[in-house]
Image: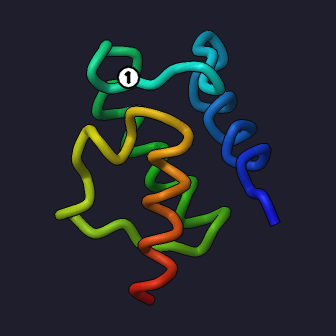
């Protein structure tokens, strides 16, 4: 089951001005700040039931929807 639409809804709630579906450098281009990432981590925990480890909080894991979905998948495997 593709959970990307669910993630896009979560991200849109965090910042409706960003076209998350097409961006590939959300952190690198300064579109997301540390507060946004904290909000995303909390939403991922609530919506997908995953715990993001401190070591996984790095820009590459939050630069795109695909990267975030990859992070969710890896966290699920580790649980």
| 38 vs 32, nearest the viewer | 32
According to the image, label 1 marks what residue? 25
**Residue 51, quarter of the rendered image:** bottom left
Q: Is residue 54 left or right of residue 72?
A: left
Asked if 24 appears above or below 31 in the picture, the reply is below
Q: Quadrant of the N terminus?
A: bottom right
Q: Residue at x 45, y 25 (%)?
A: 24
Determine crowd level at label 1: few under 14, some 14-19, many 20+ residues with C-alpha closer than 10 A.
some
Q: Residue at x 28, y 33 (%)?
A: 34
Which residue appears farthest toward the left when viewing the image? 55
Labels in figure, total:
1
Q: Residue at x 48, y 58 (%)?
A: 70
**Tag 1, which secondary structure?**
loop
Coloration of the structure image: rainbow
Asked if 50 appears above or below 38 in the picture, the reply is below
Q: Residue at x 26, y 60 (%)?
A: 56
Q: Is residue 13 left or right of residue 42?
A: right
Residue 15 drawn at (x, y percent): 58, 22
Asked if 57 appears above or below 18 in the picture, the reply is below
Residue 26 drawn at (x, y percent): 40, 24
């Amino acid at each position: 089951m593709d959970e990307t639409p669910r993630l896009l809804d979560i991200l849109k709630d965090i910042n409706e001005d960003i076209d998350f579906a097409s961006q590939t450098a959300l952190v690198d281009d300064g579109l997301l700040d540390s507060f946004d990432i904290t909000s995303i981590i909390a939403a991922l925990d609530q919506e997908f039931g995953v715990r993001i480890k401190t070591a996984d909080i790095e820009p590459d894991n939050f630069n795109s929807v695909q990267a975030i979905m990859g992070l969710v998948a890896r966290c699920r495997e580790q649980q």
